[in-house]
Structure formats: structure tokens, C-alpha cells
Amino acid sequence: MEGFDSLPDGGPGELTLRRIRRMASGGAGLVWAEATAVTEDGRTNRGQLWIRRETLDGFKRMAETAHEASGGAPIILQLTHSGRFSKPRNVPAPVIAMHNPVMDEKMPLDPSLPVVTDEYLDALPEKFGEAAALAKEAGFDGADVKCCHKYLFSELLSAYHRPGRYGGSFENRSRLFLDSIRAAAVHGDRNFVIASRFGAFDCIPYPWGFGMDRNDPAKPDWEEPDRLYRLMAECGVRLCDMTLGSPYYNPHVNRPYDNGGYDPPESRLAGVKRLLDAAAHMKKAVPQIALIGTGYSYLRQFAPFAAAAEIGSGHTDAAGFGRMAFAYPDFARDILKKGALDPSKVCVTCSMCTVIMRKMHATGCPIRDREVYLPMLKEVLGK
């Protein structure tokens, strides 16, 4: 869960360290740190973390903070390029793999904007390899090569009509993602895992989304996602945090909510079921990758029971909580020691954390972490 509270140079700020400390001290067995840019022009905004040699000391503090607070639980650093959602100076500066009329309905782009060149993309695997090496040097326990939610690598997976080395065929569309995994995997070993936050399918109409039935974007076609997932394992991925959809196009898919930018076109529980079913499919398809299932936060105090059922059935290896960790950072300890979550502390899936984020502020939970984040929410709402 991005906090967008870095220092101006991209290193972790005080709120970053506060959030990591709160999450790591809450009893979870793994902390998956937020999206961290590998290039300046790939930052979602000027508050997004950016790992490089100049910010390495700050990332060392971040890893040390997590390990001290958790008593040694591992922490993964997520590496990303934001692609069409890049705003390194808080104004849109999209790096697009293709023009996508479906996505442009939500976030219009100048039709004359050039697509990113093959030469630019050719240089990115080295950037991801360097970032993974820095994460390892900083003391993290693994690096995540992010490919989801229509950020750059995810967008390329549906670049069916892009010419050149990175479009058209499955081999071309998956090339950059797999090459970047290979570059990161050079630094992998028994103490440093290569991971991925991977979007198995987009729920976006073909040919503008990946992994979908060509006649029904509500249904997956598992042929290409399964093929890619197997290749991810061959290239060195040992751990996956799965997801679906895009928060910029269909946020109800990857994070079912009660209140958001629109009323979802389906039952919220249908969205939860889609995530649980997709995780079960992925675990069966590539059992050698340790899998973290998602979608539990919507279930509030009932989430532990769903998580226990999915893990007990072999549908996933672990349960991941995103928004819940914003609202209720000690949720894991309460599950493990009390056997239950406190209904007065759970995430209520109101999307106020996202409201703050969209206004380029540092973000957190203004409902449960009121002292820090409620004033920010009031500011962005003009209240």
C-alpha cells in the first residue's frame, strides 16, 4: 500500500518509516513494502519511493525498521515503472506502451502522444536488476518485479497492436517483464527471493486487456496467464502476490469496496469470489510458486475465516491484507492470538485512502488513523 510520503529525493520519509514500523510490529509473517520506482520518469508522483544509490541509506533504515519492529520477519521491496500513470512532478507525464481507447475513457491522453520506443524499453531490465541489487544491499529479503494494474509491464501484456520487439506475439508482449525478472534474479539466492505482484487478468475488453475471453471481459481466458505464470517460475520467481483488474479502470475488481468513485456493477462478494477463485486456479497451475491470495479486506472481521478456508483447502499459501494494514496494522496479531478481529478497528472499504492519494497527498486511513490522515482528507475535500 503506497503512502506517497517519500523525501524529495525519493528516499523513505518519516511517515514511510512510521507506516512500515506499524505494519511490521503487527504480527504479520511477511511485510510487502510498497511500489518503488526504478527510474525518475516512472514515478507515480513526487512522493513515490525511488531506489537508487543516492537513496540507499534511507532504504537501509526502512529495512532495519521493519526487521526490528517485527523481530525478524522478512520484508519484500516492490519495484515498478508506472508507465501511463507516471507523474514524477505531480503533473501527468505518461510513458505509454500503446494507445488504449478503453483506458483513455477514464484518463484521456493526447492522441498525438508518442508511444515509448523499443530502445527505451531495452534499457529497463538493467534498471530493474540494479534496483534489485540495491534492495539486497539495503537489507531487504526480496525484490518484487511488479506487473499488474496496467502499469508499464502490465500494459505491454495487452500490446497486441504494437509493432516491434514488444508488441504483437505473446513472446514480444511478455519480453520486457520476463527480461526484467531475469535481471533481478541474478541477485536472488536462498536469502533473497525474487517475487512478483502479478495481475493474472485485467477484466478489460480484448484487445485492450490481458487474459480475457475475447467475447466477455468478465471472464478470464487462462491460456496466456498460465503460460506466463509458468515462465515466471522458470525465470526465477518464487513468490507471487496475485491481483486482478486495474484501480484506474475497474477498482471494484482488485479491491471490492462499499463506497468509491461509482457504484460497482456487481455484488461486492462477487468481486471477492473472483479473487479467491483466481488464486485457487493459479496455485493449481504453478504449485511451485508460493502464492499470496488477496481480496480479504472487504470481509472485515470475517476475513480470517475466509483466509483459513482458502489456505486450508490448498487454494493459496498465505493471505495478504492491503487496506486492512492501513486501518488496523496489528490485525495479524489479533487473528493469531485472539482468533478474531475487532469490528471497531477493521477497514470499512470506504476508499478514503484512495481519495487522498488521487490528490497527490501522503495517504493512509483517515478513519482509523485519524490524527495523521484525517486533516489530509479534510484538506483535499476542502473542509
Image (cartoon, rainbow, N blue to C red):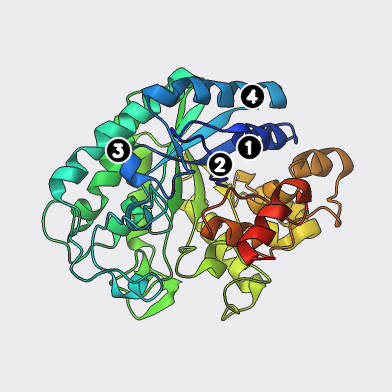
Residue 367 in which image quadrant: bottom right
168 w.r.t. 83: above or below: below
Q: Which residue is mark 1?
A: 15
Circle 1 packing at 10 Å, graded few (<14), some (14-19), many (20+), is some
Q: CA distance from mark 1 to mark 4?
A: 12 Å
Q: Determine the CA span between mark 2 and mark 1.
A: 6 Å
Residue lying furthest left: 164
Q: Alpha-carbon distance for marks 2 and 3? A: 26 Å
Say if 38 sits above or below 90 in the image: above
In front: mark 1 or mark 4? 1
Residue type at tag 3: Ser
The residue tagged 2 is 5
Q: Amino acid at mark 2?
A: Asp
Q: Which disc is residue 155 wearing?
A: none
Q: Amino acid at mark 4?
A: Thr
- Residue 4 on image: x %, y %: 53, 45
**Going from the N terminus, do you reach mark 2 or mark 3 first?**
2
* Secondary structure type for disc 2: loop
Look at mark 4 in the image and give the residue it sits on: 65
Could you tell me the amino acid type at mark 1? Leu
Can residue 68 be seen from the camera position used here?
yes
Residues at circles 2 and 1 in contact by the CB criterion of under 8 Å:
yes
The residue indicated by pointer 3 is 180
* First-in-chain label (1 vs 3): 1
> Residue 53: horizontal and vertical position, in percent?
37, 22
Which circle, 2 or 3, is nearer the viewer?
2
Label 1, secondary structure: give it.
Answer: helix
Q: Is residue 190 visible?
A: no
- Taking the view exactly as shown, the residue that stands out farthest to the right is 338
